[in-house]
Image (cartoon, rainbow, N blue to C red):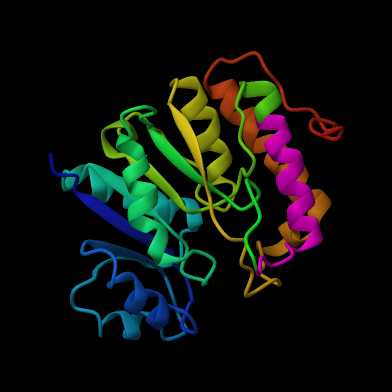
Amino acid sequence: MTNRILTALPVYNEVRHVTAVLQELRQHVEDILVVDDGSTDGTSEILNSFPQVRVERHQPNQGYGAALRTAFNFAVRYGYDTLVTMDCDGQHQPKFVREIANLMSDEYAPADMVSGSRYLRDFTGDSSAPEDRRAINSRITACLNEKLGLTITDAFCGFKAYRVSALADLEITVTGYAMPLQLWVQAANLGWRIREFAVPRIYLEEKRSFGGSLDDASIRLAYYHSVLNDELERRGLPQRFTADCGSHS
């Protein structure tokens, strides 16, 4: 039985990394989609030199969550079986794409989503995560496990595999970096079978901006809680994520 795999990358101003990432990725997979989310740094011109790569363009920039939503819709529209998403900033290694995709159809533990984790186990040469990002990830991960009955170790890793037939059940409305939180609530509510896959912890750009006031860690954490609670309310779920949720993890 064939398993049609699409690998999709949300890209915004990645002129320093996009060439190397795509060159390596093409050694491992055939079907590649780049969602160019309004890049203005020359990334778009570089993508024109990869005719084998399908490009969907947003103009202007719409956000990380919007780019992933475009990738989801593309995978559904063109009848793929498995969608693998990965970032284009050098964090995620293309050599793992087929391995994470193959876990979807493991006869002993099939999954609807396989989520990469940088904290499931250590790899030689792992980077140290920026302290504020590590702390927030730990808090939010603990909140999701506590409130939604999950057992995950990394709430924010963008390296994931999805069963494409399950994507049609999602209703993604959060367009920015908080989109994964909406995804976790919906996945838990839909009863998705979820597995994790250990990936190396690589940070090449520790100073990434989340945009405006969200660069303040306390504001970002409060915003994440509000996104989670908004999604719980939309789903009619009684749980609530409070300010101290996950603080004792």
How many tags in the picture?
0
Which x, y percent locates residue 79? 16, 43
What residue appears at the point 68 percent right and 38 percent down from the top-left corner?
141
What residue appears at the point 60 percent right and 48 percent down from the top-left corner?
156
Figure quadrant of the N terminus: top left
Camera-side residue: 159 or 175? 159
Which stretch did the figure color magenta?
A: 125-144
What residue appears at the point 33 percent right and 34 percent down from the top-left corner?
106
Q: In this view, does 184 lie above or below 13?
A: above
Which x, y percent locates residue 111? 38, 32
Is residue 141 on the magenta stretch?
yes
By secondary structure, the bulk of the magenta-drawn segment is best described as helix
Residue 145 lies left or right of residue 168; in this view the side is right
Q: Is residue 31 above or below residue 191?
A: below
Residue 2 lies left or right of residue 126; in this view the side is left
Which x, y percent locates residue 27? 28, 72
Figure quadrant of the C terminus: top right
Which x, y percent locates residue 131? 81, 59
Q: Is residue 232 above or below residue 83?
A: above
Quadrant location of residue 81?
top left
Residue 80 lies left or right of residue 135; in this view the side is left
